[in-house]
Image (cartoon, rainbow, N blue to C red):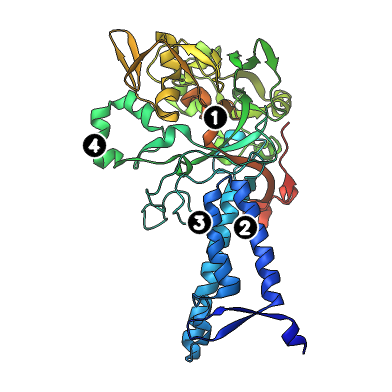
Amino acid sequence: MNEKTNQTESPVDNKGFKRKITTKQWVKFSIATLLYILFCIWMQNLWLLLGLVVIIDIFLTKYIPWGAWKKAKNPQVRNVLEWVDDIVFALVAVYFINLFIFQNYQIPTPSLEKSLLVGDYLFVSKLSYGPRVPNTPLSFPLVQNTFPILNTKSYLDWPEWGYKRVKGLGKVKRNDIVVFNFPAGDTVALKAQNPDYYTLVAQVGRERLWLDKQTFGDIIYRPVDKRENYVKRCIGMPGDTLQIINNVVYIDGKELPSPEKAQFVYYVQTDGARFTDEQFRMLEISKDDREIASNNSFYTQYFPYMGFEEKAPGDYGTIYRLPLTKEALEKIKKFNFVSNVIIEPDIFGGPTYPVGYETGWTRDNFGPLWIPKKGATIPLNEHNLALYSRCIRNYENNTLEIKNGQAYINGKPEDTYTFKYDYYFMMGDNRHNSADSRSWGFVPEDHIVGKPILIWLSLDKDRGLFNGGIRWDRMFRMVHPD
């Protein structure tokens, strides 16, 4: 009696029999439909509503035998297909979670030390700034761009969709730590990915880069969402004018306080004594950063310029090159065997943005540089073309040519340009050991991936797993801007 009252008649199935639809099916169908419609609204794409046809068939009509494998008579076949079904479901679930909610990220380099450490594993929230609709929807989950071991692409080039970001919980703010796709990673020399392609062109020339396959490998293009993930601190917002003077950042003429744990490289001269492993740990200096500069002829040639005095002819004693936070700097000055501490000068900073254009800027004295803002218009003079041509060409997908001093955009002569995107200026907290916007320029809004919110695991590569290798004090720590 109850069974009859909880069933309704459905369309005729493929065998000519009427199929019964239970109340339970209607409830499941209603919940799935509601969630799917909300998802379509969030994605701002009504074409996705066509997927309701599939939901109707899965829960109600069942014309397609989605679970036919469950009726297999061979138990071994049924068991294998059950595993396949579970794996496919897990991969689809991971794919959507990774795209729209959060992804796992490991800190590979020390550019944000001591705010984030090498060996920190993070949950990166896609919801914080709004998830992007993928540029390359057909890709393997949990693999950024290349299958390990196989060394083949983990995605299909077609279809490739344009930039679209759905509504999130907020927007990028100054001092946020942000994960983003590497802007200069659109073109990659597979065997020499550091420095970036454009710096390599300036160093060795385009012809050699493309012809010397043995050294540089194939040159490939990567869509935005398949460029390498970087993590830095956002210090410059759209419309800001940024300048760095003697390692101090100024925004629109006002000093921007450095992050609490920001560090710079210093040269530390001793009376010949050397730091112990315990002292290095107290200063929080990893093994990779414990460099004795006085053993390297590259550095010793600059010691007189830096202001170091010889202990004896040609002998400067022991001089370390160490990254130090403000707190570590104060501690190291109190060691009785330390005689002199000098910050690393500009000469070691390397080339700055824009590559190939002489600005006179350095790593420690950079700008002033205006950061592009959506809707803002600039004149197309020589200086602006040097600073913003990459934004116009590479990020906003225009053609740009200069003929007889006249700029042509998409084949038309133009004297001004109006930006389509907002841009950001990113820097690492490890100010002298960070390849950031000072080297490769702006981060467009379409490259923003998400915001690190939680450190769920932290491993110290300098120590054994059961000998302090797990940083328990960092486990499940929220990531907050200073």
- Mark closer to the observer (1, 2): 2
Of marks 2 and 3, the one in the foreground: 2
Q: Nearer the viewer, residue 29 or 158?
A: 29
Q: Amino acid at mark 2?
A: Tyr
In the image, what residue type sits under mark 4? Asp
- CB under 8 Å between discs 3 and 4: no
Q: Earlier in the sequence, mark 2 or mark 4?
A: 2
Q: Earlier in the sequence, mark 1 or mark 3?
A: 3
Q: Nearer the viewer, mark 2 or mark 4?
A: 2
Q: Earlier in the sequence, mark 1 or mark 2?
A: 2
Q: Which mark is residue 212?
A: 4
Would you identify the image quadrant in which residue 178 lies? top right
Percent of width and height locating residue 123: 65, 49
Residue 467 at x, y percent in the picture = 67, 55
Q: How far apart are the two marked residues, 2 and 3, measured between alpha carbons?
A: 21 Å
Q: CA distance from mark 3 to mark 4?
A: 33 Å
**Is tag 4's residue or tag 1's residue first in the polypeptide sequence?**
4
Location of mark 3 (residue): 141
- What is the CA distance from the residue labelled 1 to the residue labelled 3? 31 Å
Name the residue at 46% across, 85% down: 77
Q: Could you say which disc has been placed on residue 117 in the image?
A: none
Q: CA distance from mark 1 to mark 2?
A: 46 Å
Mark 1 lies on residue: 433
Note whether residue 315 is visible: yes
- For disc 1, the neighbor class at 10 Å (few under 14, some 14 to 19, many from 20) is some
Q: Which residue is the site of mark 2?
A: 36
In the image, 297 versus 448, the foreground residue is 448
The amino acid type found where label 1 is placed reads Asn
Q: Indicate which disc, 3 or 4, sits on the residue closer to the N terminus.
A: 3
In this view, the residue in front, 475 or 444, is: 444
Relative vertical location of residue 397 with respect to residue 128 in this rendering, above or below = above
